[in-house]
Amino acid sequence: MKNEKCENTLVITNRYDGIDLPDAACRLLIMDSKPHSETLSDRYQESCRAESDIVAIKIAQKVEQGLGRGVRGEKDYCAIILTDSELVRAIQRKESRKYFSNQTRTQIEIGFKISEFAEDEISTGKKPILAVTDLLNQCLFRDDGWKAFYTESMNEMAESTSDNKGILDILAAERDAEQKYKEGNFTSAVSIIEKLANSSLVKTNSERGWYLQEAARYMYAYDPSKSNELQKAAHGANNFLLKPEHGMVVKKINLVGQKRIENIKKWLKSHGDFSEAILKVNEILSNLSYGIKADKFENSLNELASAIGFDGDRPDKQWKEGPDNLWTIRANEYILFECKNEVNLLRVEINKDESKQMNNSIAWFKTHYPGMTVKNIMVINAGKLGKGAALKDVEVMKEKQLKKLVKNVRAFFNEFKELDFEDLSDKKIQEYLNFHKLTVDDFINEYSEKIK
């Protein structure tokens, strides 16, 4: 490849650490999608504590390593494209961007600036692909204006103001606790990690739960009963953690006393401005598609509930039993989802095992939500029952209905582009919900169909 003999495609699987592609070996680098962890331990942490600073640091390191593959010296140059909504949001969020080096952070800022230039050109009628390629060519053909803009931006690079002392204190406590555990001093290990869990260094219930689970792990060999109590507390703080052996209580979700419009306003304000909010919306919607991995799909369906003012739950992941997703849409009224979006789109029948799983989820709902009204939806493109399959009061959300939902949600949030999030009208939001078919009645009637 370095000799420019590229008749065949070169694929280097599952690694880029340590690979150098200087000068003509790489003039265009594409990073497609957010890096994921390789070890089971790291993957588990990402699924349980996705908003953790520790996880954000690891992702930032991976991204920065990738960005550095194509530029190996002061005189080297390379155009880099970052694509995929999760990756873009990961580098745009202030919480994660602070863990990049000053140079990388400034280069990312330059990327956002020139993206705005491209948007301006597109708004005047220029084809998007031409706007992008023209920007790339300015870099690749060493346009004098581009070089001056880049040099000026890098010279104005702000000095780092990030303080990682809190992170270092957390890592030091983790190390000390693990060392005590290895020495067989279980009670000291638990004491260190419990102190950390209850300190100001741990800012969210999700993280507090994680460290209580670590304490439960340390205590198990010494006192299984005490370990189970710690695990109950951990799971209570973070439902995505391991289920305690006994004593877990399923928390119900309900919209009693809550206003949907108010929930939507709170969700929008929590993202600061439209650009941050629409970035999150695009990330959610990009994962609501057939063929997407089940965990991503189900997580995005849960996040969608919050974005559009409902309350959501993932019983199978949070309580280790029940349906994949559960929404409360009105007081004492719910939508139950069983997600089979990874099933082949060409399959026309729902099989026996799938119907059994759906029926088990319905039974779970009746046990934990007695007397409540529920709409049961299976997300699957099949519309007939196969041999031995039996379902009652169940509808299916096929690909066409899912695409319709995604389209309507995107159009709904685009309505807020020019609005001030601090001065949103309840009446206007309701009009948008009505117009884009996102009312409660629409969810009951528009996005699923009966099984033939």
Image: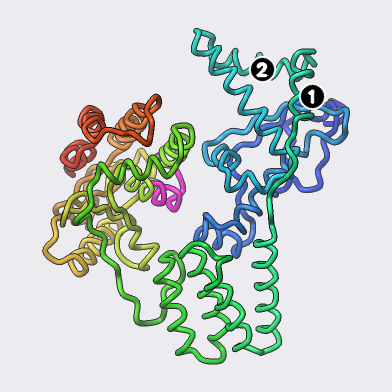
How far apart marks 1 and 2 lie (CA) works out to 16 Å
Query: Farthest residue toward the front?
Result: 423
Which of the two residues, 79 or 426, is positioned nearer the viewer here? 426
Sooner in the amino-acid sequence: mark 1 or mark 2: 2
173 left or right of 356?
right
Q: Residue sitting at 82 percent across and 30 percent down? A: 25
**225 left or right, relative to 340:** right
Q: Tag 2's secondary structure?
A: helix
Against 47, residue 279 (above or below) is: above
Image quarter hosting the N terminus: top right
Residue 18: horizontal and vertical position, in percent?
A: 81, 47
Pointer 2: what residue? Answer: 135
Q: Image point 24% across, 50% down: which residue?
A: 386
> Dividing the picture into quarters, in which one does residue 270 lie?
top left
Residue closest to the eye, 80 or 145: 145
The one nearer the camera, 208 or 247, is: 208
Mark 1 vs mark 2: give the one in front: 1
Label for residue 151?
1
Counting the numbered discs, the total is: 2
Q: Position of residue 102 (x, y in %)?
A: 74, 41
Image: magenta residue range: 289-300
Q: Where residue 171 sits: x, y (%)?
A: 67, 67
Q: Residue furthest bottom?
A: 222
**341 relative to 427 in the view: left or right:** right
Give above or below for 79 relative to 212.
above
Amino acid beneath label 1: Thr
